[in-house]
Image (spheres, rainbow, N blue to C red):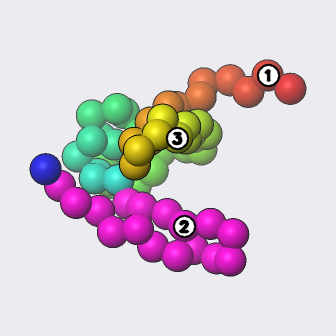
């Protein structure tokens, strides 16, 4: 099990890193290992320290 550190980003948010191997499997990185394009991620708190991340293909406005 990989552990990732929670980091302070600014006064209103914190962040974690995601392993590039997992991002590569999802097709989110280009051939240089950089994020390919822009992606929206929906983060949902499930409860008791559990969260889910979901790539949102289209945002209905």
Q: Give the image location of residue 8, x and y in percent.
A: 52, 76
Q: Earlier in the sequence, mark 1 or mark 2?
A: 2
Q: Earlier in the sequence, mark 2 or mark 3?
A: 2
Q: Which mark is residue 26?
A: none
Magenta-highlighted residues: 2-17
Taking 1 as reference, is 39 above or below it?
A: above
Q: Which mark is residue 60?
A: 1
Residue drawn at x 27%, y 34% as measured from the top left: 25
Secondary structure under badge 2? strand
Using the image as rendered, state which of residue 37 and residue 12 is in the foreground.
12
Taking 60 as reference, is 32 above or below it?
A: below
Q: Give the image location of residue 29, x and y in percent.
A: 38, 44
48 sits to left or right of 57: left
Q: Give the image location of residue 22, x and y in percent.
A: 27, 42
Secondary structure under badge 3? strand
- Closer to the eye: label 1 or 2: 2
56 sits to left or right of 23: right
Give the residue pinned by disc 2.
14
């Amino acid at each position: 099990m990989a552990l990732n550190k929670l980091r302070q980003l600014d006064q209103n948010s914190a962040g974690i890193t995601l392993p590039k191997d997992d991002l590569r499997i999802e097709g989110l990185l280009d051939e240089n290992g950089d994020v390919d394009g822009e992606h929206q991620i929906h983060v949902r708190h499930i409860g008791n320290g559990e969260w889910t991340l979901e790539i949102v293909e289209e945002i209905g406005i």
